[in-house]
Amino acid sequence: MDSTTSEHFDAILIGVGQAGNPLASALAGKGWKTAVIERKFVGGTCVNVGCTPTKTLIASAQVAYLARRSSEFGIETGAVRVDLKKVMERKNKMVETSRENIEDNLAQTENLTLIFGEARFIGTRQVEVSLPDGQKRTLTANSIFINSGSRPRQPDLAGLDRVPWLTSTSIMELEDVPAHLMILGGGYISLEFGQMFRRFGSNVTIIEQGDQLLSREDSDVADEMTKILTDEGIEVYVNTEVHQVSQARDGTIELQLSTGLKATRLTGTHLLVAVGRVPNTEALNLTATGVETDEKGHITVNDRLETSQPGIYALGDCKGGPEFTHISYDDYRIVRQNLLENGQASLAGRLVPYTVFTDPQLGRIGLSEQEARRQGKNIKIATLPMTSVARAQQMGQTRGLMKVVIDAQTDQLLGAAILGAEGGEIMTVVQIAMMGQLPFQRIRDAIFAHPTLAESLNNLLTKIT
């Protein structure tokens, strides 16, 4: 179509992530003529390079780990061998199936037009799409929704541009297990991939600039996580700065490090850089719309996800804040309720649960102890080691601890960190109690089926006096 001819829609969605996909269907289902623009693959980070592939790979790593432990359970097996190519093939099939299901659903939705191409604003309500064949289409709409996601951040590190390095996306295309994987960063992505590849057979070194892994967590939780990883043979450096990266003639990668005043060198075969993510907003030409961004490029929104430009909304990672799939989906819920159901939904006060899918998992909800103390709250703390949980003993999964934060005045649960077997599932029990504003005694005195992991909440909360 001639780029000078504008096609008008009721709504344009830029990006088909975990907010854009259901929102497109909801708008079209209400009769809105809707255009959906996707640069490459539908499904966003979660389906293509995030939750779906990583958790599929983690499941394979878990099988390898349990196979090596089988004699502890009285089961004899032979030597465990990881075929990474087959592991990746299983992951690819899972991703392709999920992606195809989304694309098929969009294609079959009445009032919806799916366009593959690169979108950029050329006016306040005008979007130009560069198509794969070099052609352009110009679209206009009264309502525009940006769900463009984020990508791994490349740090300003001397020599990085001259060595082969991996991101959380490209590492999932490897077909051979790295001999020695070095990882920059001590966050969720780093820990999940570090433990995964250690279980696949790699030597793994994690390098964190701060004074602990998982900088957002309480020190006792972070210390326990570090112990879990080091017990599996992962080498962890904290308070360590990387100054330069280089590649030797034999192809190995060398890092120049310093821990305090001590300088050292570290050599490995592969380097994963996992030091955060940046929003996919620079190519959108937002200046043409008057949509404001912060200093990091995140789109600024109010509590209803409206940008500085009326009629334009931002959802998911591109707007900043917690970068989780379930938060992106909740962004969709807020916009749907407000636009299609005359609701008053808002970001204000929403609980943000998350799970780090290490083994054991770390399930988190609400305030940590350090966050509560910073807010000046009068709190009570209870912790329980997983070695005291009967179900964990029976499963042979006794690593980790459970921790809750209680408001000393109201007896309300303020938050929890569950680092243990199925920590994310146990955390959800606490979340539901928080949603119902139940005092902690209701959970402490509840009858849970025995023996379950959630039953351990009885013992944990008994420690609150």
Image (cartoon, rainbow, N blue to C red):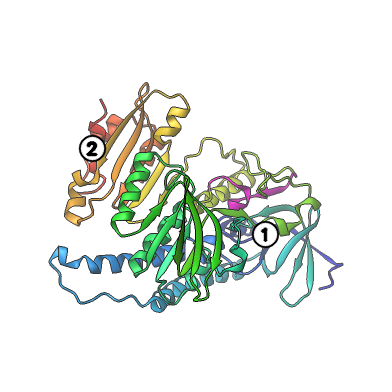
Q: Position of residue 149 (x, y in %)?
A: 60, 57
Badge 2 vs badge 1, beta-carbon distance below 8 Å: no
Res 94 → quadrant: bottom left
For the C terminus, give its image quadrant. top left
Q: CA distance from mark 2 to mark 1?
A: 47 Å
User: What secondary structure is marked by label 2?
Assistant: helix
Boundaries of the magenta span: 309-322
- Please name the residue that numbered disc 2 is placed on: 458
In the displayed structure image, the side of residue 397 where residue 423 appears, left or right: right
The residue lying at 55 percent from left, 62 percent from top is 245
101 and 83: which is toward the camera: 83
> What residue occupies the far top of the structure in this picture?
409
- Identify whether 337 is placed above or below 89: above
Residue 460 visible? The answer is yes
- Please name the residue that numbered disc 1 is placed on: 14
For the residue marked with disc 1, what is the amino acid?
Ile
Q: Earlier in the sequence, mark 2 or mark 1?
A: 1
Q: Position of residue 399 (x, y in %)?
A: 26, 50
The residue lying at 79 percent from left, 54 percent from top is 125
For the N terminus, give its image quadrant. bottom right
